[in-house]
Amino acid sequence: MDRTFLLVGALAGFTGVALGAFGAHGLRARLSPDMLAVFETGVRYHLIHALAVLVVASVLAHGGGWLFATAGWCFAAGIVLFSGSLYVLALTGITTFGMVTPIGGLFFLAGWACLAVAAL
């Protein structure tokens, strides 16, 4: 399981950096400042949670437990739903994608809650 989260975290970090560069260099002239800020918010949360997945991988390599694995999957789902919906919203302008964003945020919160409970 630790290798799975190492792979997920590495891929999330890779795509987060790539999307950040795309936003900074390819979208600055194409998006409004508000939509560029939405895109950048997606990248910020994407990269923060890519690191969280890597922490989960490290903990699982030393034993961990089911709460850590659950946290890792929650962080991965949050990246897809939260950041993904912000990317799509910024690139398409279709505001209905914004309805998915809070669900991704709940996955992020659930992941952090799992880590907190595991620490107890």
Image (cartoon, rainbow, N blue to C red):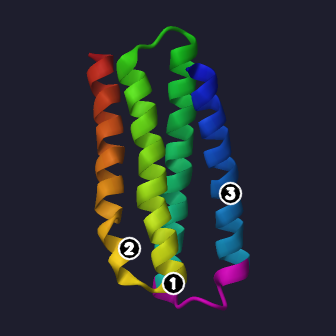
In this rendering, position of residue 33 left or right of residue 11: left
The residue that disc 3 covers is 17
Q: Quadrant of the C terminus?
A: top left
Q: Earlier in the sequence, mark 1 or mark 3?
A: 3
Over which residues does the magenta segment extend? Answer: 26-34
Rendered residue at 36%/46% (across/down): 108
- Compared with 23, 49 (above or below) is above
- Compared with 48, 90 (above or below) is below
Rendered residue at 41%/59% (across/down): 82
In this rendering, position of residue 47 left or right of residue 97: right
Number of residues whose C-alpha sits closer than 10 Å to that of mark 3, classed few (under 14), some (14–19) or many (20 or more): some
Number of residues whose C-alpha sits closer than 10 Å to that of mark 2, classed few (under 14), some (14–19) or many (20 or more): some
Number of residues whose C-alpha sits closer than 10 Å to that of mark 1, classed few (under 14), some (14–19) or many (20 or more): few
**Secondary-structure class at tag 2:** helix
Q: Nearer the viewer, residue 82 or 58?
A: 82
Q: Position of residue 2 (x, y in %)?
A: 58, 21
Rendered residue at 64%/74% (across/down): 23
**Secondary-structure class at tag 3:** helix
**Secondary-structure class at tag 1:** helix
In this rendering, position of residue 109 left or right of residue 44: left
